[in-house]
Amino acid sequence: MEDALSVPPLFSGNFAFFFDLDGTLADIKPHPDDVSVPDAVLARLSLLAEMNNGALALISGRSIAELEQLAKPWRFPLAGVHGAERRDIKGHTERVTLPENIVQPLERSLRHEVASLNGVELEAKGMAFALHYRQAPQHEDAVFALAKQMVARYPQLAMQPGKCVVELKPSGIHKGAAIAAFLETPPFAGRIPVFVGDDLTDEHGFKTVNALGGESIKVGAGETQAKWRLDSVNEVYRWLERITDHQQEKQQALTNRRDGYESLSRSI
């Protein structure tokens, strides 16, 4: 879509909300361990979930264990490693794994190659591997070449570029598939999906949500399939405040009308 996209409206009704984390709910930091989500933002997410019957999930390239730590004290449905692992609202977790006879030689090969790329970090996630080059942008071409080499060697893998990172993950796993899986189960089933994300890894999610008649929101600049745009993480925070306030006002107005009707019925 064209770059000039409007700020999303304040959705209220039969919606399900999905949020990426890094670059969406938290500013990207030089090292992933430096990232945090403000308590006030987590409280707003919890409020939005409460007002939509729990239909809110975090969808990230991070593991579920990392997402759980970042979301404390709240416990949301989660999709980690782009959907390779997914925890539903009841706490049931499903995982897609790679065979051990692939994981171990793949990790050995990656560590051997990365050792010669000063500043490039390898993050092993069990069922996926991330090559971070934020601290060494001069190695971008070498990182992509290494990732392509591994995908050619192991057809079970797919390559997923992101912001200063290239990930190797099980083929067929992406955020769009994770969102679609959530939408097949309560409390998401039958609701219109809204997905907010910032990166190339989120474009699969935008595509899926658009195809389902939902609302897709890109954070930051760049070409995208999303329908709407928020300029920054701070703009996400402001929109989150406005949409929770808006939904609370609508729910309160509905409660007042219902109470007034019941009072009138009793008087009659």
Image (spheres, grey):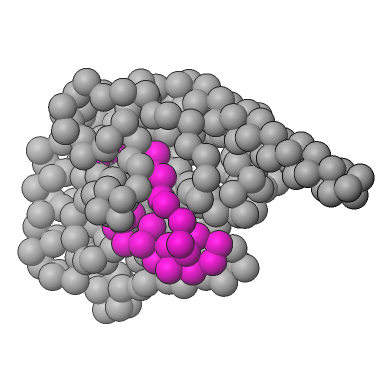
For the N terminus, give its image quadrant. top left
For residue 206: magenta? Answer: no
Q: Camera-side residue: 161 or 206?
A: 206
Residue located at (26% from left, 37% from top): 226
- From where the camera sits, is residue 171 visible? yes
Name the residue rendered at 35%, 42% in the picture.
215
Return the x and y of residue 31 as percentages of the image width and height.
42, 34
Left or right placement of residue 43 versus residue 30 in this view: right
Q: Is residue 87 above or below residue 61?
A: below
Among the 4 quarters of the image, the one containing residue 22: top left
- Residue displayed at 10% across by 54% down: 148
Q: Position of residue 137 (x, y in %)?
A: 20, 29
Tell me if residue 41 can be seen.
Answer: no
**Residue 174 coordinates in the image, percent (x, y):** 29, 57
Residue 152 placement, left or right of 243: left
Q: Is residue 246 shown above or below 85?
A: above
Residue depicted at 64% across the width and 45% down the height: 51
Q: Nearer the viewer, residue 32 or 89?
A: 89
Magenta residues span 174-200
Nearer to the camera, 7 or 77 = 7
Say if the magenta span includes residue 184.
yes
